[in-house]
Image: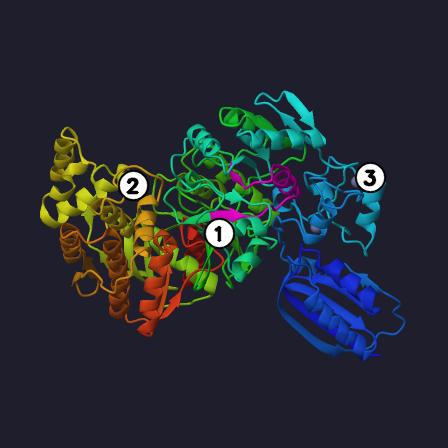
Amino acid sequence: MPRLSIEVQGVVQGVGFRPFVYRIAHLHGVTGWVRNRPDGVEIEIQGPRTVLDEFLVSLRKDRPAPARIERIATCETIEQAGEASFAIVASGHSAETRPSVPADLAICPECAQELDTPGDRRYQYPFTNCTYCGPRYSIIEGLPYDRPKTSMKGFPLCADCLREYQDPLDRRFHAQPVACPVCGPQLRLTDGHGVAIAAKVAALVGAADALASGAIVALKGLGGFQLLADATSTGAVARLRQRKRREEKPFAVMFQTLAALKRDCDVSEAEARLLGSPEAPILLLKRRDGGTVAAAVAPRNPHLGAFLPYTPLHHLLLAAVDRPLICTSGNISEEPMAIDDADAFERLREIADVFLLHDRPILRPVDDSVVRLEAHGMNVLRRARGYAPLAHPVPSQAPPILSLGAHQKNTIALLNRGQAVVSQHLGDLHSLQGAQLLERTVEDLLKFFATRPEILACDLHPDYASTRLAERLAVQWQVPLVRVQHHHAHVAAVMAELGLAGPVLGLAWDGSGFGLDQTLWGGEALRVDAKGCQRVGHLRTFPLPGGDRAVKESRRSAAGLLWELSGATGPVDNLYTASEQPLLHSMLERGLNTPRTSSIGRLFDAVAALTGIRTVRGFEGQAAMELEFAAERASDPEAYPWAFRGEECLVADPAPLIQALLKDLQQGLSVAIVAQRFHRALAELALAWARHADLKAVVLCGGCFQNALLTRLVRERLLNAGFQVHLPVVFPTNDGAISLGQAWVAAQRSLLDS
Ligand SMILES: [Zn+2]
Ligand SMILES: [Zn+2]
């Protein structure tokens, strides 16, 4: 009888792939075996030719939802005599096996079905899961991924669960977190001091009733605590904003079903697939008029961060409340989420009215991922649940490298044996909790991958918590520390992700990062290859009166820019009180606490202030976002002009741009058209730098490219002029990818040195 050897590559480990192969082998009655290999799964099957063909069809078609098959290679092999059955065998070449840490997966359709089926033994059980779904990364203590090394170790399996766990034909065969109402975790409802209010079903009903009456509920979710509130109630939203001290930043909303979500948002087929995928991210969608969600959830914002219930607990709660819920991280401002009960009581007591808890420990914070689908593909704004810490191939012969990232939206990365593992979004490192989480995550990754880094990498900024930790570890481990310029790392991250060797032109546009020349960079054109980075263009620098305060007050960027261009601040003087003006002018005249910047993010701020769209406070990126939304409302082909100077390094001078813009405003042109012309000017700037650099491949990166309109205009302009445009797909364009870029730069340097 014929025998086939099959190699399957892709995401096929930790997603129930071998049990799936076992089941279809039994179904088709073939003999042979399946085992994990370092780079995928290897199968041998033997049987009649037609049956083998059916097996191959089923292998592709019926694969578990979380599995991704990138390649299947088959070849004939020698018939084995006397083989009676099909078996899952131990992994081959265990020394070569690259460990992988599976990501948390959203509840699968089968489990959701059981949840809703009266009489099923897991009917309405909030912690049901199987090989295809459920917690992973958030409950794993160590590898290999087995129940005793998870936070489920304190829940001995009942006889029924054990039978399922041991039966290769069962969907729960070797599902490490398998549980049922008899043996698994349970719910309880408490007040802010842990005093019990209700348990099990009554706890769920109690939480649902609280939400329906406008209360705020702290929910112990999958990867941390979340704050929930009725998204249709203006009062509940206002209460949450006031208690969380979050004035205007949009909240994400969880909808019970796709049908309910479609009442509030436009959803394409591709977007619907992503919403229902095992990763189940928060998706930024276009908001519909007349939806059910209160306007205050995302004020003056045409988009809504929407998602579907991804745990059985969310399913049950949403069904019980029967309305969309705000579902936001359980923290204050940008601190890490609370993951244990005591910490949650401490930090969230003043915000939440009641706490819906369970007794399955969460071992590390894993936030919800945030994604937007754009014309060019996926734009990952926050990479966490469902995606992290899945490894990404980055072929390299370099020794193990650990990089600690930047300061905001931070991640860390481990580059080892041809793959990069980038941690989940860790958030900002301003707080003590943030710095502690950074350190714990370093320990986590090194433990999981049993690696001792031989090189460390960090940012150039001396005061980042990540830089300080890198310096300490470098001394402790006696390894070299590579400091990588922020925007160089931005470009390198995209090169690492897409496997670009360079040279490329990297347009790294963001808020600001520490430059090589004592200024704050952020409007950069960089020529990058394996050897290094050369600055071939930048925005003319301008002063930022007040330094860091300018990030929160766009009027400061406007004042600094006008001062630079004209020596006066006339058009924005009305944004300052009579008592503020002398201080502003003295700062600008004497250059006190007034760093210079070439940041395009700050140029966005300046234009937002000049147009009156946003002048003072707000959340990070708000001014640029509102400028983008304004521009989306207009359609105008014109672009404001630039002046250029310099030979090697082409400096872009926004003087003519600002002049034309002020004239338009004086003449009463609509802010929408002004904003549109400004966006188009930036597309022209990209093209000017691309022509100057004379490199075919252009990489777009940095926080500014979270702006969908800017990305589209720049991309189209460059493509039409014959350039290749590269954007990240798997990793964020913002600082969440800095760690990956640092690791890539350190790897190239180590290879050049050796
Ligand atoms: Zn399942
Ligand atoms: Zn059980």
Mark 3 or 1 closer to N-term? 3
As drawn, the label of residue 551 is 2
Query: Looking at this rendering, what residue extends furthest in the front direction?
Result: 290
Name the quarter where the C terminus is drawn. bottom left
Relative image position of residue 395 (x, y in whole percent)? 51, 64
Which amino acid is tagged 3? Cys
**CA neighbours of label 1 inside 10 A, class few (<14), some (14 to 19), many (20+):** many
Is residue 481 among the parts visible in the rendering? no
Q: Is residue 114 left or right of residue 318?
A: right
The verdict on residue 325 being magenta is yes
Q: Nearer the viewer, mark 3 or mark 1?
A: 1
Relative image position of residue 550 (x, y in whole percent)? 26, 40
Q: Secondary structure at mark 1?
A: strand
User: Residue beneath label 1, please?
Assistant: 265
Q: Report the magenta residues as a range.
A: 305-329
Cβ of mark 1 under 8 A from ligand 1:
no
Q: Is residue 671 above or below residue 231?
A: below
x 15%, y 37%: residue: 574
Q: Is residue 362 left or right of residue 621?
A: right
Which amino acid is tagged 1? Cys
User: Residue beneath label 3, please?
Assistant: 158
x 83%, y 64%: residue: 26
Q: Nearer the viewer, mark 2 or mark 1?
A: 1
Q: Is residue 397 above or below residue 220?
A: below
Which amino acid is tagged 2? Val
Measured in 3D between alpha carbons, the distance from the residue under mark 3 to the one under mark 1, in whole angstroms, is 43 Å
Q: Is residue 189 above or below residue 720?
A: above
Give the camera-side residue of 421 and 282.
Answer: 282
